[in-house]
Image: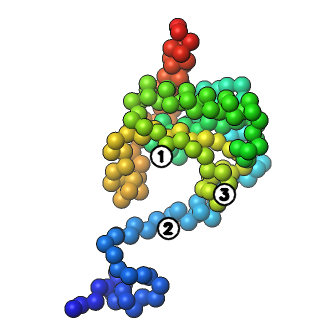
Amino acid sequence: MTAELSPEGVPLEEQAGVGGPDAFQRLYTPHRMAYIRGEGRSRDDECPFCSIVGMSDEDGLVVARGKSVYAVLNLYPYNAGHLLVVPYRHVADYADMDPEEIVEMAFFVQHALRALRAASGAHGFNTGMNLGDVAGAGIASHVHQHVVPRWGGDTNFMPVVGATRVLPALLGQTRQMLAQAWAQTASDEQGG
C-alpha cells in the first residue's frame, strides 16, 4: 500500500500536526489574513459611515434616509443589493443604541426586505450584525445591520472556487433601482 502524499510530496502521516487524511479538498485564502489582522480598517476619526451622511445619495450610495438611521449599499457586497442599515450617530454597540434608533433600524430592515423583493425577486435573506473586531465587523466602531438578498444557486463555483463575486449591475445602478423600489414600497404601504 502506498502512503498518501501531501502536495509537497511528504507522506501525510509524517507531517506533524496536519491530522488524518479525509475526503475534503482544502481551498486556502491567504488574502483573508489582511482582513483578520484588521489591515485597512478605518480608525474612529475616519469612519466611512459618518462620512456618508454628508454625501449626496448617489455619491454615498444611500438608498433611503430616516430620522435616526439610513440604508446604504455595501461597497464590498456578498450579493447584488447587499444593504447596510446604519444609525447616523457614531455608536459601536447595539446595546448602546437609543430606543428610537433600534426601532427605526428594525423598520428599515423590514422595509429593505420588501424593497429588495420588489426590485430583484430575492428568494431569501441573511440579516444580522457583526459586533466587534473578533466577530468579523469590518467597521467595528460604528454599528450596522446587514441585509443580504439570496437566490437559489447564488453560491456557485465563482465565489467558492474562483474567489470572484458576479454582480449583475454597477453599484450606482443598483442604488437607483433599490431607491425606486424603496419609494414604491413605501407608497404601497401607505395606500397610495
Tag 2: residue type?
A: Pro
Tell me which amino acid carries mark 1.
Answer: Tyr
Report the disc number at residue 34. Answer: none
Colouring = rainbow
Give the mark nearest the N terminus, 2 or 1: 2
Other residues around mark 2 within 10 Å, as few (<14) / some (14–19) / many (≥20): few
Question: Which residue is the site of mark 3?
Answer: 133
Pinpoint residue 160: horizontal percent, then vertical percent.
Answer: 38, 56
Left or right, 73 with respect to 15, comes to right
Task: Give the SS element for disc 1.
Answer: loop
Q: Nearer the viewer, residue 176 or 127?
A: 127
What amino acid is labelled 3 in the image?
Asp
On the image, the x and y values in percent for residue 60 come to 62, 34
Query: In the rendered image, is residue 68 in sight?
Result: yes
- Figure quadrant of residue 117: top left
Q: Is residue 157 left or right of residue 39?
A: left
Q: Residue at 40% of width from left, 67% of height from top?
A: 27
Question: In the displayed structure, would residue 178 be above or below residue 124?
Answer: above
Q: CA distance from mark 2 to mark 1?
A: 19 Å
Give the mark count.
Answer: 3
* Above-or-below relation of 53 to 141: above
Seen at 29% across and 85% down, the residue is 4
Provide residue 29's location: percent of width, then percent of height.
46, 65
* Residue placed under numbered mark 1 in the picture: 78
Please give the residue where the numbered disc 2 appears in the rendered image.
Answer: 30
Task: Name the residue: 36% across, 59% down.
Answer: 161
Mark 1 or 3, nearer chain start: 1
